Image (cartoon, rainbow, N blue to C red):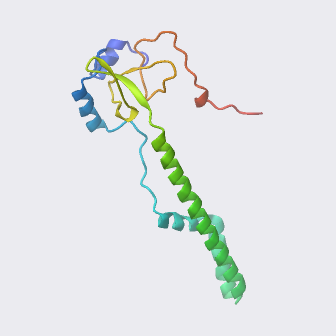
């Protein structure tokens, strides 16, 4: 779309420089869904605990415990199994608490976006930006979605967050 003129872009997305109507925006929100990263099904603590036993090292330790039983080395088997379960409990706790922290952080970072709806600039949650919305950007704004610029004055973009410096 970057190489097409504005009129063609507006026509393709069935919008205008006056923006969408609230009714049309709501219909697009219902048909296309929210402007957000898809959320994955949350794991239960039991699933996280079971996943701890899928590590190759843990599988090797389980095989070692089986050999210890077969060679009548009950002390070695007991010690290996204790290590496996302590590892599983610690790993479960760490993964569960990091998921909870990430969820809290996600809820704290709510971005508002200014869009042109019904011919008036309105501030809405970024999740409610729909295809065809005219977004009003100002200095310091975070870009809420993929956009095609219609008009820009003294535009500067800091893309440093998108690039990675490799050290030699």
Q: Give the side of residue 30 with respect to residue 46, left or right.
A: left
Where is residue 84 drawn, in percent x and y? 64, 72
Above or below — where is 18 with respect to 141? above
Screen quadrant of the C terminus: top right
Q: Residue furthest top?
A: 153
In the image, is 95 to the left or to the right of 133?
right
Question: As rendered, which of 93 and 156 lies closer to the eye?
Answer: 93
Q: Is residue 54 left or right of residue 113?
A: right
Say if 133 sits above or below 127 in the image: above
Q: Position of residue 77 (x, y in %)?
A: 68, 82
Q: Residue furthest right?
A: 168
141 shown above or below 34: above
Q: Residue at x 33, y 30 (%)?
A: 130
Q: Which quadrant of the structure image shows residue 26?
A: top left
- Position above or below: 105 against 86: above
The residue under the point 49% across, 64% down is 45
Q: Say which of 51 and 90 sits in front.
A: 90
Residue displayed at 66% across by 79% down: 65
Q: Name the side, left or right, on which 89 lies relative to 64.
A: left
Q: Residue furthest bottom?
A: 72
Residue most toward the left?
Answer: 23
Quadrant assignment for the N terminus: top left
Q: Position of residue 19 (x, y in %)?
A: 30, 19
């Amino acid at each position: 779309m970057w190489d097409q003129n504005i009129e063609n872009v507006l026509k393709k997305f069935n919008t205008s420089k006056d923006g969408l109507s609230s009714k049309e925006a709501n219909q697009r929100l219902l048909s296309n869904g929210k402007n957000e990263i898809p959320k994955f099904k949350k794991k239960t603590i039991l699933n996280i605990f079971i996943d701890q036993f899928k590590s190759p090292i843990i599988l090797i330790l389980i095989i070692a415990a089986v050999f210890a039983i077969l060679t009548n080395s009950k002390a070695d088997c007991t010690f290996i199994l204790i290590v496996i379960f302590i590892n599983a409990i610690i790993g479960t706790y760490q993964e569960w608490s990091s998921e909870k922290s990430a969820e809290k952080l996600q809820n704290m970072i709510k971005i508002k976006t200014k869009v042109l709806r019904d011919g008036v600039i309105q501030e809405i949650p970024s999740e409610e930006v729909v295809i065809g919305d005219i977004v009003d950007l100002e200095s310091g704004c975070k870009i809420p979605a993929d956009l095609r610029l219609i008009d820009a004055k003294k535009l500067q973009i800091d893309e440093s967050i998108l690039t990675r410096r490799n050290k030699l």
